[in-house]
């Protein structure tokens, strides 16, 4: 599903760019970012934890990162950063 809104237990609404629900598997969330997005990382980390998802299933797709930057940010935050070039390879084993 694209552009869905979920409400958490605290009546907080969150819009998700892409949420994929593979049958019998863990959901996969992809947040598409361009430009400045670092100020929203705490919000994404909190939501990932609230949803009980592993970091590998909450992706930040950032068009302005190279592979090394994406790996460094993934190591710093409990989120997975991917680029348009690494998205498919990361997602295939999860689906």
Image: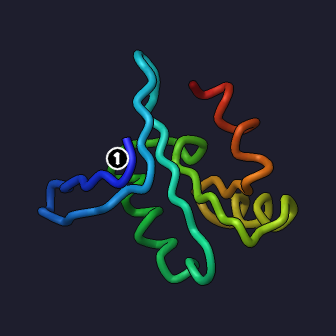
Quarter of the figure with residue 67: bottom right
* Residue that badge 1 annotates: 51
Instruction: Name the residue located 46 percent from the left edge and 72 percent from the top edge.
Output: 42
Q: In this view, does 48 lie above or below 56?
A: below
Query: Neighbour class for label 1 at 10 Å: few (<14), some, many (≥20)?
Result: few
- Colour scheme shown: rainbow
Q: Which quadrant of the figure has residue 33? A: bottom right
Give left or right: position of 22 versus 94: left
Q: In this view, does 24 lie above or below 7?
A: above
Residue 61 pos. (x, y %): 63, 58
Point 32% across, 61% down: residue: 15
Q: Is disc 1 placed on a helix, strand or loop?
A: helix
Task: Residue 53: give x, y in percent of width and height.
Answer: 44, 42
Tell me: 58 left or right of 47. Answer: right
The C terminus lies in quadrant = top right
Residue 47 falls in which quadrant of the image? bottom left
- Count the marks: 1
Residue drawn at x 15%, y 55% is: 9
Tell me where residue 66 appears, x and y as whole percent: 84, 65
Quadrant assignment for the N terminus: top left
Answer above or below: position of 58 versus 14: above
Q: Which residue lies furthest to the right in this view?
A: 68
The residue shown at (60%, 42%) is 56
Most foreground residue, 34 or 69: 34
């Amino acid at each position: 599903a694209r552009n869905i809104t979920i409400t958490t237990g605290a009546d907080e609404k969150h819009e998700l760019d892409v949420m994929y629900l593979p049958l019998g598997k863990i959901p996969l969330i992809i947040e598409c970012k361009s430009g400045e997005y670092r100020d929203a990382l705490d919000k994404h980390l909190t939501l990932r934890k609230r949803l009980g998802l592993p970091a590998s299933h909450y992706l930040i797709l950032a068009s302005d990162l190279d592979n090394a930057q994406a790996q460094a940010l993934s190591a710093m935050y409990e989120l997975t950063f991917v680029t348009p070039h690494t998205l498919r390879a990361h997602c295939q084993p999860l689906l």
